[in-house]
Image (cartoon, rainbow, N blue to C red):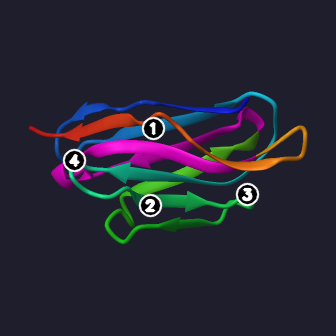
Amino acid sequence: QVQLVESGGGLVQPGGSLGLSCAASGSIFRLNAMGWFRQAPGKQRDLVALITSGGSTNYADSVKGRFTISRDNAKNTVYLQMNSLKPEDTAVYYCNGDITTRRGITTNYWGQGTQVTVSS
């Protein structure tokens, strides 16, 4: 069984920074493309940032230049560094990705989410 566990959310003032981590555990052979999504109350869940297995990245226009996604394949962990945070960044942030198990099965997984609140 594979699990994704996010950590690092919390309350931060506008203009501040916060770092999120997503640790994958279980019978893992490889993390493939991994991403961070977010969902604000009453809104749909949207892609924030994506990183491929090769390290290529893609960002939503709203976070370009402020957020950075990275990964540590040895630790099966994906990160999201968020700088210059704005109130509109307030949401539950979810880790998502395609993970190949040691049995050779690739499945898409979601984490449980972590709350990020940007407020003075």
Q: Which residue is mark 2?
A: 47
Callout 1, which amino acid?
Answer: Leu
Q: First in sequence, mark 1 or 4: give its number.
A: 1
Which portion, as a residue range, is magenta?
74-99
Residue designated by label 4: 41
Q: Is residue 29 magenta?
A: no
Q: Nearer the viewer, residue 6 or 70?
A: 6
**Residue under the image location 35 percent in, 62 percent down:** 63
What type is the residue that disc 4 sits on?
Answer: Pro
Indicate the position of residue 8 as horizontal and vertical percent values: 42, 30
Q: Viewed as shown, does residue 83 lie left or right of 48?
A: left
Q: Position of residue 3 (x, y in %)?
A: 64, 31
Q: Which sits earlier in the primary sequence, circle 4 or circle 2?
A: 4
* In the image, residue 98 lies in the stretch drawn in magenta: yes
Q: Going by the picture, which residue comes out furthest to the bottom? A: 61
User: Could you give the CA–CA distance between mark 3 and mark 1, rounded to whole angstroms?
Assistant: 19 Å
Q: Nearer the viewer, mark 3 or mark 4?
A: 4
